[in-house]
Structures are given as C-alpha cells and as structure tokens.
Amino acid sequence: MRKAFGLFMTLTLVAGTALFLARPAPVGAQGGGTIEATVTYAGAPVVEKLKVNKDTEKCSTEALIEKVVVGAGKGLANAVVSVAGAKGTPTGRKASIDQKGCKFVPHVVAMTTGELEIKNSDDILHNVHTYSTANPSINKAQPKFKKTMTEKFEKPEIIKLTCDVHSWMLGWIAVMPHPFFGVTDGVGAAKIENVPPGKHTVEVWHETLGKATKEVEVKAGQTTKVAIEMKK
Amino acid sequence: MLARVRHRGARGAGGGEPSSTTLAPTRATGSCRLASGDPDSTGLGRARPPRRPARRFALGAVLGLAFLLAATTPAGAQGGDAAAGKGVYQKKCALCHGEKGDGKGPAADLLVPKPRDFTTGIYKIRTTATKVPTDQDLFKIITEGMPGTSMPPWAVLPEKERWNLVAYLKTFAPEKFKEAPKKLELPKDVASSPESLKRGKEMFEAIECNKCHGADGRADGPSRPELKDEWGHPIAPANLTKAWTFRGGATRVDIATRLANGMLGTPMPTFIDSVEKPEDIWHLTNYILSLGPGAVKYATLVTVTAASGAIPDDPNAEVWKTIAPSHIPLMGQVIVDPRNFNPSIDMVSVRAVYNDQEIAFHLTWDDPTQSVEDAVKKMYADAISLQFPPKITADTERPYFFMGDGSDAVYLLRWVGGTGVGEAAANGPTKIAPIAGGEATGKAVWANGQYRVVMKRPLAGKDAARPTFQPAVFAPVAFQAWDGGAGETGTKMSLTSWYYLRLEEPQTNRRFVLPPIVAILTLAAMLLVVRVASRTGAR
C-alpha cells in the first residue's frame, strides 16, 4: 500500500514537472503583447539616514530611508508600471514581502487582489501597520516566533506599509485590479507580459514623485518599448 | 489641567471597577424603554382595550424582543437621538473636538494627546473584532473619560444625553458605522498565579513589549521617541506601572482586550494572533497588572521617620525599602509663560528619614529618558526640588506656593542632573539664586525609566535662608520637577501646592526604661505600706 502510494506520488511529481516545463509560452498562447517600460528620473536620489538606537545586530547602526532610488542611466527604481484601466482576472499567485534587516524587501510589492504573505526574517518584533482607505487598515504584531503571516487585500489601492517599532521601515503594497503591472528594477526597467493588443495608457506610480502616464500601442506577439520620465 | 483634576477626583471616588457598576443599569433602562415605548408609539394599546391574554402575550413578546435585542446587540438597544446629541455636543464637546468633529477645536492645540477626530471613525478603545466600537464602548468613554488625557468623565450629564451624544458622534463617520459590530471573543480567562506571572513575563519578553513600554513597563522603550499616531502626532506608550492612567480602563478585561485588539490609530498592534497560545493574552494581562500597584492613594502628609545611626546616600540602599512612600501628584505649571500644559512627570513618591544630625529625602519618579543639557535638541537637565519656607515654626505663614514672591522667599533643596544636590533661595520662578556654603549632599540613580534620588542636609539651618527642622512641628513642603528630555526647563515644570511634612517624635529608649522603673517603684512603695501596716498591726 505504502509502496503504491509512493509510486503514485513520484509519478504525479514527475508528470507535474514535465507539464510545467512543457507548458506553452503564455505570450503566444493568449495572443498578447509585451510592454517593456523604462522609467527615468533626472533628479538626484533622495536618501535619508537615521541613527539606529536598537536591534543594531539586525538593523545595523544606520538606517537608510530611500525615498528616491536612481540607478544607472537615470533609471528610477521602485516605481509601479501598470496598464491603466485594463481588465483581467487576478493571478491567484500569493505575493510575498519580507522584513529583513529592518527593511521591507521588496520595497514595493505589486499584486493582484488577494493574499499577501508577510515574512519576518529578522528574529525580532516588527509590527505590520498599513495605511489604507479601501481595504481595512491593519496593525498586527509579528513577534520573532511568527515567521510568516498572510493578509488579504480585496480592493485595488496602493497601501503604505510601516513598522512602528522601527519607524524608518517603509514599504508599499500596490494592489492592482488586473495582472498587467510590473515594478521597476534598479535601472528603472519593468516588463508587463500578455497585454491584450490595442491602445493602452501606461501609468507609472512612484511613492515620492507621484504619477505619470504615456499612450502605447501593443501588438500581438510583439514587444513595445516605452520610456517615461518622472518629474518632481 | 482642570479636566485632569476633576478626573482624578472622580476616579478616586469611583474605585477600582467603575465599568461594571455604571453599565449594568444602563442596559436595563434601555430595554425597558423599548418595551414600554413601542406599543405607545404605534397606538396599539389605546384604540381599543385588548383582552387580557392578548395583552399579556403582546407584553411578553415585546419584552422578549427587547431582551433579545439587548442580548444580541447591546449597542443598538439604547438608540440615542443624534439630533438631540448635536446640541449637547456643541456645548460640551466642540471646544476640543471641533464643530465638525475633526478634532480641531480651539483648545486642541494645547492638548496631548490630541482630541479624537471623529470624522475618521478611528477609535482607540473598542471591544469589537470589527473596526468600529460599539455604542456601549463610546458610552463608556464618554461616561468615564480617558485617564491620563484631557478627556474628563461626563457622568455629570444625564444618561439620555450621553446616549444622544453616542448617536451624534456616529454621524461624523456614517460609512464606518454601517458595518454591524462584532464582539471580540477573548480566550478563556486565566487567573493570576505565580505560574501565570512567570509565563506572562516570558511572553512580555518574547513579544518585546519593552520596545515601546520599556523593560519594567515605564514607557521608556527605545522606540518611544519614534512613535506617531495615525495623524502623525507624537504619541507616548502607556506607562504599564500606572494602571490608573490606562486610557481604556484598568480592569483585567480592559487590559486583555487592548492586548488582543490593539488600539486603532496608535502604534499599539493587535496581539490576538501574535502570541504563542491564545491564553497568553491573560498571562500577559496578569503580568502587566503586577508591574505596578494597580491603584494609587495620594498622600497629603509626608511623615519623616526617626532613625538612629547614619542615613545612607545610596538611593538603592535597603533601608529605603522599609519605609512606605507618600505619593504626591504633580500638575503642569499653567500660571506663567511658558506654561506646561502636558507635564511629563505626574507623580513623585517621597520617603523621608531623620536622625539627630540630618534629614534625608528619598524621591522616586518616572522619567523615560536620562537627559543631558543640549539646547540644540531642546533638551535640558532633569531636575527636582523640594520647597520649604526659610523659617519653620508652628505659626509659619506660607510664602506663595509657586516658588515664593518678591516679599517672601522660599528655600529650595534640589537636585539637578549633571550638577547634583544643592540649595537655593527663590523669590519667584525666575528669581532663583543658589545659597553658597551649602552642606546638602546626595546621590541619584536612573534605571529603566525611573529616577531615585537621595538628598540630605543638616537638621539645623546654619543661617536665616535655611530652615531648621524640628520634631512634631508641621513643615510646609512643595515639590517641583522637570523632565529635561521632554523639553521642560524654567517655568515649564510640574509642581504641587503646599503639602505638609512632619518629623515623627523621636522614639528613645525611655519608653522601655521608664515604665518598669515606675512599676518597680510602685511595688516597692506598696511593699513598704504593707510592711508598715503589718508592723503597726502586730503591736
């Protein structure tokens, strides 16, 4: 009996892996296009420093509050790029954010409506405190022994995330009504796949610099590049 | 300040658990009103006198319904009249909370914590698992006030008006109050015991309450200076050793509810899902209550204990623990500018001892930071002073309590952080001059958000500027304190009016020697009488 079960499990696993590897490329399958956005900012990075008076083993002695992060080629990091007004179903994937080194990692997490896994890798107390209007605000303690917790965000909105114990900790949860979004990396690049063909408005949101938009036309199976410059 | 004074009085009289006594009758009247009011309003009972059984049935049904309503939705049963509440609000509440309920009344700038902004629907104190409080929660806060804040208890208003206020407050955030409140279910109660306290301490450390509240609960945690409320105002963590200042009450259920539920709009998070086991909420509650005396009894007289032998300088010496402290409440100085509307130090505990040479004062008070003078950061030295008239006699006329005036000086025995113990003469709060050649000494320690200071000086004053202390003579005494870390300096202080100090009569060995001698002498006299009598009788 046990042997049979083991065999069954192995087969399932193998079959599953094979199916996963062999799955068709989603772009072609759905006939969508790709948007490759580059977000730039000509201004200087804004980073505030704060002397840390506690948990210095985990948090280090100096905290950086990174309000504007600018990388190579003036690329603006941590900006949410999305297709404004798009329709689509939630991905169903559980998004995840970690509290590590007394920082939210990633600094901006974008997700479709649904669940967010919140980790605490620091082995010290954090409290997950959100400031939202559409969703209920939460302020939950996450002591060292509570490594993960899951929160639900049912309504699209961009939510500020803080920790009162370590006041410099700041993160953002971008809850989107559709799956067409990305967050810019260190050089300001973000990729949105499977975008339905047609004319769209690409919207950029940044915590300090606000919003900007640009019109694009997406063609099936093709990649559309869009450059957006953020101004103060 | 007025609010605070009033508040203390009411709490003192109310005793430990005012919630249970005031709330029970409310619910009863609420359901009664519903029962008697409903048939009247529909006119059912008037048109034709119904037959008895039907009437009885109707009454039963209405009563049953009322009971059901009261049991399931205690909040909805009282049904205040929002329109009537508006009038009361404008008279009694708008000064702080603002006409529009946005917490921006004319007095708001002077208050810390700031008055509630009702338009957000965010309330600190709630017993619900949902986001808004029940009507009962709001009624309780209106009735009992919020200890440690400027919100006084409004039990002076008729109960009906308080319910009307509840109804009116809800109209400031109608969207928020649409959702039906759901009662928070607390885990099964665990009574306090040594095991429970041990577990509570363990949890206190594991969930790091100390980060804000401090290792001993005196609100001195490292995160204290960073804490902000929902509106960006600095907010202080609760001093867990002073349960009487807990905003939402200090009963076990109050505390467990705050722990489980958090306090909305503040950094205090919910812990119901963040303790190892649900019953840890109760272990923590028990432990938190064990951190302080629970209730405080303020003194009006400080007794100076007579002692023989040397008096130790060390504030942590064993002898101080043997003396019961007199707790003296302090108020913010609001007589002259700059005023101190939100004093940091609200109490000083005094122990005093004297011997044939010296008098010594041991003062204990909570101060979250040991501050050093730093004018740039608006930080000043912490300080405390005891004030006496320069001459103490049975018929002393007391100088003006606020550090004397132009015609009558006061004598100050004081300790200033970084400087130490010294003596000064004052002719008002801005005219303080150190007295040279002082013999006052002392020592201060600060640990976990608390100062302990010993100040000593000779019993006899060596000149006219210094008082001489004598047993059995009531000496006027007043106190002033500064929390330099909170920006207190000069007239920004906490202070008291005059209290009294009395040196206990010295207890010499005479009481052990004299009575036996008298007894022996009496016995001898009796024996003499008997002997004389028997001799006379024998002749």
Image: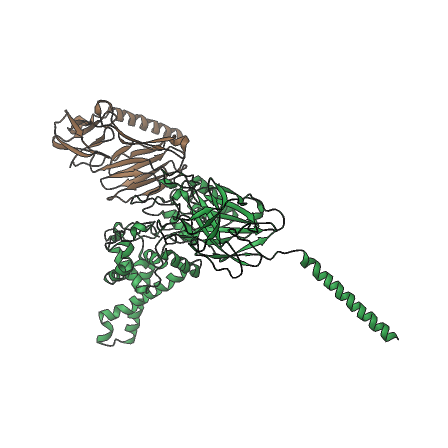
In this rendered view, identify the residue nearer to me: B64 or B352: B352
What x and y, as percent, mark residue B285? 44, 48
Report whether residue B61 is seen: no
Q: Colour of chain B?
A: green
| Number of marks in picture | 0
Q: Residue furthest top?
A: A73
**What coloring was used for the rendering?**
by chain
Q: Is residue B491 above or below residue B517?
A: above
In the rendered view, tell whether residue A173 sits above or below residue B7: above
Viewer-closest of B347 and B200:
B347
The C terminus of chain A: image quadrant: top left
Residue at x 31%, y 55% (from the top left corner): B134
Location of residue B218 with respect to B38 vertically, above or below? above
Tell me where residue B490 appears, x and y as whole percent.
40, 46
Q: Colour of chain A?
A: brown
Q: Quadrant of residue A26?
A: top left
